Image (spheres, rainbow, N blue to C red):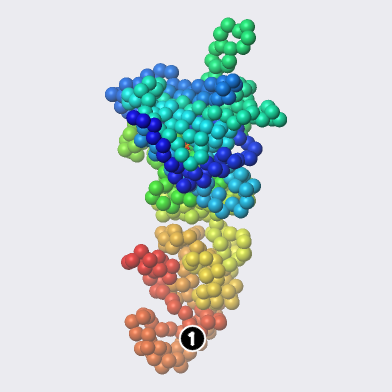
């Protein structure tokens, strides 16, 4: 097949332009990206070989190799992993598929100036293309495990790339960067220097579970040059806390979490006894944009004795903790387990229960010790965690202990149910809330008038899930959760007997008017009543206690029901 030329997708082109012209100072991260891809490819081959006996591949020496050539000014990262087919190269390398990059581009468009855009590169990393920060040409030679022929991809990053079929390619992938001319002013950025490569790998990729090797140039007078393994390959989760720096944890998080910012919190867990496992979990600082979509890939990496056997293992955490990233390494699981079997597995369920409690207690500690970081966490993930109030009755109290809600008590200080109850006045028996789209729309609702006038605190619930959990939970410490927009809410009755009689008398007086109004409104309403809930507005619409709340009603209506 002849060499074919293709154009990059529009998004890819945008990204490449940015890489080529980047003045981003920390260009070293390109090597982290290439090593990370190589490591993923080795993981995939290992898994494929486990699952498919028919796959004829040699997995006895899986590794990554880095080679530099100062004369030719090239740097090559080679792996003997899964490799890519011709079609895959076109799909995976020619387009921008992964969600991290989509998010990156979105933020890039919102970035106001060049400096803002540059900062984003540091946060996101952006994968394979980051090579163009340091190279003016990249070539990739790859052969997919089990296939006969290989593929060569090549690009100068300027709008097009070429693809060509090759007969004799080793299995796996090698990526060669043709480095930009050396900057005589800045020797520190010479990526053909073994010293530099060693430093970068050590800094960013030490935990990679496959050996990253480098064979130094044969120096004068030296007979041979032995390949040197640059990374320690030590699994961070198996090392003791004081042996591992925060930076090392953060690099692992970036690798497993596909996030390019440090995590908000790192959670370690070592379970000993009959069923041993270690877990290293991360709470991200930012909710991914697709967290509430079907396509969101949740789950942790599952290792068995240091061997990755499953990515995105959903069974390890409940759906309401789907934002948690990390690794679980178990001692006694079969390497060959399927997802279906895992869902049923008693040990996996045990791990899930334990991890769930651990995550919730971590949030509780965060809340007690670091109000600001807790606030970030709850802002980003509170709406997801509250789903657990419905699905996880066992941990309901633990979730309620860390849940905070906007309230009329204070403008910018959310409250727990506990704190609400502590503030309740003498005559108040119930916890009042109102649901709605925003704090503002709720506060402007006529339902709020009497509560405001009487100084009764109301929780302001604005997440869609709030509609549902308040009913499921029903009460807290014996106090009913009551919507201010539903049924008869008689604040007067709380103190004053005479008020009731007064109302009755007024009712008789206004019977004619109410009857007339009811006739006029017809089927639009169930009833027309006098109310003590308003102080300023002349009238408002109220649901029966068992009717849908206005927000749910409009939600269902929007869904066409
Ligand atoms: P990401 O790693 O986040 O998916 P990248 O831009 O780094 O994004 O890589 C894009 C895709 O190209 C990868 O998901 C992978 O499928 C493929 N790829 C990149 N490098 C390799 C490699 N060394 N071996 C096999 N596939 C690779
Ligand atoms: Mg990558």
Residue occupying the point 58% across, 45% down: 120
Query: Looking at the image, which is closer to me, 266 or 113?
Result: 113
Circle 1 residues within 10 Å: few <14, some 14–19, many ≥20: some
Q: Which quadrant of the view contains residue 488?
A: bottom left
Quadrant in which the N terminus appears: top left
* Residue 492: x %, y % from top left: 53, 78
Queried on whether the Cβ of the residue with tag 1 lies below 8 angstroms from ligand 1, the answer reads no
Quadrant in which the C terminus appears: bottom left
Mark yes or no: residue 237 visible. no
| Residue assigned mark 1 | 503
* Residue 486: x %, y % from top left: 44, 72
Image height check: is 134 above or below 229?
A: below
Is 157 displayed left or right of 520 in the figure? right
Image height check: is 414 above or below 89?
A: below
* Residue 469: x %, y % from top left: 43, 59
* Residue 51: x %, y % from top left: 32, 28
Image height check: is 217 above or below 380?
A: above
Secondary structure of residue under mark 1? helix
Query: Looking at the image, which is closer to me, 3 or 400?
Result: 3
Q: Quadrant of ligand 1?
A: top left
Q: Residue furthest front?
A: 2
Query: Looking at the image, which is closer to me, 538 or 95?
Result: 95
Residue occupying the point 39% across, 91% down: 516
Q: Residue furthest right?
A: 185
């Amino acid at each position: 097949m002849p060499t074919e030329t293709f154009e990059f997708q529009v998004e890819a082109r945008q990204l490449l332009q940015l890489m080529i012209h980047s003045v981003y100072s920390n260009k070293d991260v390109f090597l982290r990206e290439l090593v990370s891809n190589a490591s993923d490819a080795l993981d995939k081959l290992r898994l494929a070989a486990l699952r498919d006996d028919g796959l004829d591949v040699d997995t006895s020496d899986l590794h990554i190799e880095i080679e530099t050539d100062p004369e030719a000014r090239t740097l090559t990262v080679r792996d003997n992993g899964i490799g890519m087919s011709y079609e895959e190269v076109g799909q995976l390398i020619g387009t921008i598929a992964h969600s991290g990059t989509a998010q990156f581009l979105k933020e890039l468009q919102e970035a106001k100036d060049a400096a803002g855009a540059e900062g984003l590169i540091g946060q996101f990393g952006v994968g394979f293309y980051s090579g163009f920060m340091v190279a003016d040409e990249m070539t990739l030679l790859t052969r997919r495990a089990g296939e006969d022929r290989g593929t060569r991809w090549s690009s100068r990053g300027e709008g097009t790339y070429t693809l060509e079929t090759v007969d004799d390619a080793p299995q796996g992938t090698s990526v060669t960067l043709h480095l930009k001319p050396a900057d005589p002013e800045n020797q520190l950025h010479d990526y053909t220097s073994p010293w530099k490569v060693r430093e970068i790998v050590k800094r960013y990729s030490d935990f990679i579970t496959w050996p990253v090797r480098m064979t130094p140039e044969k120096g004068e007078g030296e007979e041979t040059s032995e390949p040197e393994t640059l990374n320690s390959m030590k699994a961070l989760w198996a090392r003791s806390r004081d042996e591992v720096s925060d930076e090392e944890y953060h690099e692992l998080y970036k690798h497993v979490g596909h996030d390019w910012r440090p995590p908000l919190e790192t959670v370690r867990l070592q379970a000993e006894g009959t069923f041993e496992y270690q877990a290293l979990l991360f709470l991200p600082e930012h909710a991914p944009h697709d967290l509430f979509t079907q396509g969101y890939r949740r789950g942790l990496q599952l290792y068995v004795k240091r061997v990755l056997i499953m990515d995105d293992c959903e069974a390890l955490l409940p759906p309401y903790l789907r934002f948690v990233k990390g690794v679980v390494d178990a001692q006694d699981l079969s390497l060959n387990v399927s997802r279906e079997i895992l869902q049923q597995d008693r040990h996996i369920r045990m791990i899930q229960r334990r991890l769930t409690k651990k995550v919730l207690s971590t949030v509780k500690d965060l809340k007690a010790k670091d109000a600001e970081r807790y606030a970030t966490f709850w802002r980003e993930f509170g709406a997801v965690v509250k789903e657990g109030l419905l699905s996880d009755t066992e941990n309901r109290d633990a979730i309620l202990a860390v849940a905070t809600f906007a309230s009329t008590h204070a403008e910018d200080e959310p409250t727990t149910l506990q704190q609400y109850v502590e503030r309740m006045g003498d005559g108040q028996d119930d916890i009042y809330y109102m649901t709605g789209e925003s704090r503002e729309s709720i506060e402007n609702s006529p339902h709020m008038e009497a509560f405001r006038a009487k100084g009764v605190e109301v929780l302001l619930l604005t997440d869609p899930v709030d509609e549902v959990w308040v009913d499921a939970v029903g009460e807290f410490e014996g106090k009913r959760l009551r919507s201010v927009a539903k049924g008869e809410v008689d604040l007067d009755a709380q103190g004053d007997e005479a008020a009731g009689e007064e109302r009755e008398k007024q009712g008789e007086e206004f019977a004619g008017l109410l009857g007339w109004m009811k006739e006029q409104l017809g089927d639009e309403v169930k009833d027309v009543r006098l109310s003590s809930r308003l102080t300023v507005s002349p009238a408002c619409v109220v649901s029966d206690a068992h009717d849908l709340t206005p927000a749910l009603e409009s939600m269902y209506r929007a869904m066409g029901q």
